[in-house]
Amino acid sequence: MIKVGILGVGTVGTSVAKILKDNADVISARAGREIVVKSGVVKNLAKDRGLDIIITDNVDDVLDDSEIDIVVELMGGVEEPYAVVKKALQNGKAVVTANKALLAYHRYELQDLAKTQAFEYEAAVAGGIPIITALRDGLSANHIESMMGILNGTCNYMMTKMANEGVAYDAILKEAQELGYAEADPTFDVGGFDAAHKLLILASIAYGIDAKPEDILIEGIENVSSADVEFAKEFGYAIKLLGIAKKDGNEVELRVHACLISKDEMIAKIDGVMNGVSVVGDKVGETLYYGAGAGGDATASAVIANIIDIARAGKSSPMLGFDRPMEGKLTLKSTDKIESKYYLRINVTDKAGVLAKITKIFETNNISVETMIQKSTTDTTANLLISTHKAVEKDIQAMMSELEALDFVNSKPVMIRIV
Ligand code: HSE
């Protein structure tokens, strides 16, 4: 029999304990033995979780319990869970975590600490979708050429509702929070950080890249407005928050930001709270993974898959899937060098000569316009909605600063990259 201790018995932890009971028939058959939750750690002892397990508010009751084989970390945060899982490993426990922020900062130290002990984290990226197993094991014969993912259900839910129902940003965010999709601090969702944590984990498995969130381009969906949604519709695009990884020679580009993406792309059709990841391998071609990226039962499904794997084998694959450098030395591409097509929304005072001055600034920054429309916002102001041909990030950023400084530009111009 395998005994599990759960650190953080919230929505996901409760689902883990319940599913281990509800599906005990298939789980024990697949694991080759019975798996039971012995104890759980909570902050608030007074709240009844309706579970038949020992509940404590002291993590050491689990970490120092010699009967516990697997510690499941669902606490959230970074440094506190890091200290806790470190102690769990030192005490000889296998660890399963759903904590993407912990891994975004400490995955390499944890790999070193775990060595031959099991340390699994399927639920940390895209909830119930088995993307870690797919990438680490199923696609392990391939050089990974690119990955593109809808990795945050809250943002995807919000973008879908804005596009389909024209609901205002604040109202949808509130709804996503009430439905339990959003992080405790929703800026992690709408600011792109949650998706970036997940992208960094995938990039380590695919490329061995050791980057922190501070090292990569992270933008959220806060500036996307109904004017952009209308432009997107008119020109056949969806707007999505995407995590993008792309190999270019010995460099890898990693970025998270809102994107205009052709409605014909498969990933553009992933709507609502669902997540999706496209992975292109040099031998397999494009593969696509779709499913629930948030929610108690879906996330618990991935946590339990790891528990079963550990119960079966005692030790699963190396944590990040490799134990020597891959493909020589791949390095992170500098953000300045990223190339893309861009969409810009510039609110201007509507008077003679404005367009000429703006297009001159495009020219001096080496940016070529592909489409342009003007839509009045008041009697005296208008939005210029412009898409560009392929340009370099550094040039776009320089141009944006110049545009912002013009006296007839009424607010900071908004830029969305086109995939
Ligand atoms: N807040 C996350 C999301 C939950 O919206 O996708 C899963 O990590």
Image (spheres, rainbow, N blue to C red):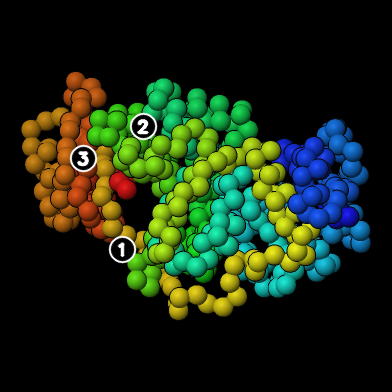
> Residue at 59% across / 67% down in the picture?
321
Q: Secondary structure at mark 3?
A: strand
Question: Alpha carbon of mark 2 to alpha carbon of mark 3: how far?
Answer: 15 Å
Counting residues from the start of the chain, the first of labels 1 and 2 encountered is 2
Is residue 317 visible in the rendered image? The answer is yes
Residue 387 vertical placement versus 112 (above, below): above
Q: Which mark is residue 108?
A: none
Question: Alpha carbon of mark 1 to alpha carbon of mark 3: how far?
Answer: 21 Å
Q: Quadrant of the N terminus?
A: bottom right
Q: Secondary structure at mark 2?
A: loop
Contact flag, marks 1 and 2 (Cβ < 8 Å):
no
Contact flag, marks 2 and 3 (Cβ < 8 Å):
no
The amino acid sitting under disc 3 is Ile
Within 8 Å of ligand 1, the CB of disc 3?
no
Q: Which residue is mark 2?
A: 225
Q: Secondary structure at mark 1?
A: helix
Counting residues from the start of the chain, the first of labels 1 and 3 encountered is 1
> Residue at 61% across / 29% down in the picture?
179
> Residue at 27% across / 34% down in the picture?
236
- Tell me the crowding category of disc 3: few under 14, some 14 to 19, or many 20 or more residues within 10 angstroms, Cα based: some
Q: Residue 222 occupies which quadrant of the picture? A: top left
Within 8 Å of ligand 1, the CB of disc 2?
no
- Whether residue 169 sits left or right of residue 121 in the image: it is left
The amino acid sitting under disc 2 is Ser
Q: Residue furthest front?
A: 29
Q: Position of residue 175 (x, y in %)?
A: 55, 26
Question: Alpha carbon of mark 1 to alpha carbon of mark 2: how far?
Answer: 27 Å
- Whether residue 33 sits left or right of residue 408 in the image: it is right
Q: Which mark is residue 386?
A: 3
Q: Position of residue 382 (x, y in %)?
A: 20, 29
Q: Position of residue 79 (x, y in %)?
A: 69, 58
